[in-house]
Image: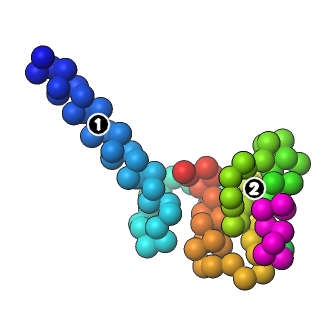
Amino acid sequence: MKHIYKSLALVLGISIGSASLAQDWKNPEAPFDARKVLNEKTTITWRRVDVNDVQKTCEAESRKRGLGGFGYRVYACSFWEGDRCDIFTSKTPTLHDLGHETRHCFQGAFH
């Protein structure tokens, strides 16, 4: 019986730890591991659209690339392939929006 409780505690600890790490990407002040990158150098194209068009643009770009869309609210998006990355934001993004998408350009699907 003790063995079951120890296993359960380990599973819960890993789950809670993973969940808290998975949420760090939402905190603009949270440090992150910059050792893992897709590219050391990339060409980034920043495309700015009207604030009301961000969702529509991101969904369309996702489908155009064969990714099927998001299915949830986005305020910015990025798409990367090789050493090229396209970022889409509103014309008035937050620094967090742009920084978050730029991180995708270097680290891919980090969350």
Label count reads 2
Numbered mark located on residue 79 in the image: 2
Numbered mark located on residue 22 in the image: none
Percent x, y for residue 19?
40, 47
| Residue at the image point whose x is 61% and y is 49% from the top | 109
Q: For the residues carrying marks 2 and 1, which lies nearer the camera in this image?
A: 1
Q: Can residue 3 be seen in this view?
A: yes
Numbered mark located on residue 12 in the image: 1
Location of residue 105 with respect to 82 vertically, above or below = below
| Residue at the image point whose x is 21% and y is 33% from the top | 9
Residues drawn in magenta = 50-57
The amino acid marked with disc number 1 is Leu
Q: Is residue 35 left or right of residue 40?
A: left
Percent x, y for residue 26?
50, 63
The amino acid marked with disc number 2 is Phe
Q: Residue furthest top?
A: 1
Q: Which of 102 and 11 is in front in this view?
A: 11
Percent x, y for residue 66?
84, 41
Q: Secondary structure beneath disc 2?
A: strand
Q: Nearer the viewer, residue 99 or 22?
A: 22
Q: Is residue 48 visible?
A: no
Percent x, y for residue 94?
63, 79
Q: Secondary structure beneath disc 1?
A: helix
The question of residue 71 being in magenta is answered with no
Q: Which residue lies furthest to the bottom in this view?
A: 92
